[in-house]
Image: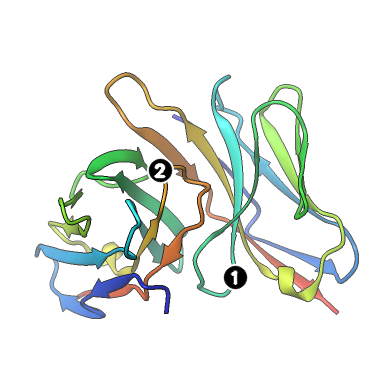
Amino acid sequence: DAKTTQPPSMDCAEGRAANLPCNHSTISGNEYVYWYRQIHSQGPQYIIHGLKNNETNEMASLIITEDRKSSTLILPHATLRDTAVYYCIVRVPRTQGGSEKLVFGKGTKLTVNP
Amino acid sequence: DSGVTQTPKHLITATGQRVTLRCSPRSGDLSVYWYQQSLDQGLQFLIQYYNGEERAKGNILERFSAQQFPDLHSELNLSSLELGDSALYFCASSVGRLFTDTQYFGPGTRLTVL
């Protein structure tokens, strides 16, 4: 079964890059990696997702290792508003007659310091 | 106010009991999601329904079940309750069926199992 492992907490200085790691060593070839964040008990906010290639959008970059066993979410210039809990998620596509499965990690609490 | 309503706001019950949590999505939203938030596990996705059908599953225990009714409201049933089931249970809704669609969260139901 897919599983994700994340460090429980990290600190980052404002303006610097925040690099959040996730281990998903049991991931299969068709399972996507998603990243979400939750700011202070609000609902989770979608950040980015990817399968094999590195991805970049206006919020972040996602670097997936060649063996796909781990990934890193990069917030290039962290601000105080990026302080949140970041969740790494593996999405297992639906099988015939079944439903998708979404496996959440326990999250990394990122604190951006002034 | 997200437009998503959840009842009850608070629920206190004993171990071994069964409870039902209710969620009404925003008008026009077809997807309903259930999440469990506890201090030690963080935010955990439980299950998603889209237009009455199960769409995605997370780490939902076999003691838990959910359904979405024709009027699109949803109920989460928790049975044989244990102390560890004490948590804040969120419901969210979205227009489409994709997990990456913007999800609007309700205020949550706080369940305390004594």
Q: Is residue B62 left or right of residue A91?
A: left
Q: Is residue A57 above or below residue A30?
A: below
Q: Is residue A53 above or below residue A86?
A: above
Q: Bin the neighbour count of mark 1 within 10 Å (Cα to Cα): few under 14, some 14-19, many 20 and up.
A: some
* Residue located at (90% from left, 68% from top): A15
**Quadrant of the rendering where the N terminus of chain A is positioned:** top left
> Judging from the image, what secondary structure is the residue with disc 2 in?
loop
Contact, mark 1 vs mark 2 (Cβ under 8 Å): no
Query: In this rendering, does residue B71 appear at all?
Result: yes
Question: Residue B67, percent across and down?
Answer: 18, 49
Question: Residue A36, percent across and down?
Answer: 59, 54
Q: Which residue is nearer to you in this view: A38 or B38?
A: A38
Question: Residue B98, percent across and down?
Answer: 46, 42
Q: Chain of mark 2?
A: B
Quadrant location of residue B73? bottom left
Q: Which mark is residue B97?
A: 2
Quadrant location of residue A45? bottom right
Name the image colouring: rainbow
Question: Residue B46, percent across and down?
Answer: 34, 50
* Residue located at (33% from left, 32% from top): A99
Q: Which residue is nearer to you in this view: A92 or A97?
A: A97
Query: How many numbered tags mark residues here?
Result: 2
Dot 1 corresponds to which residue? A39
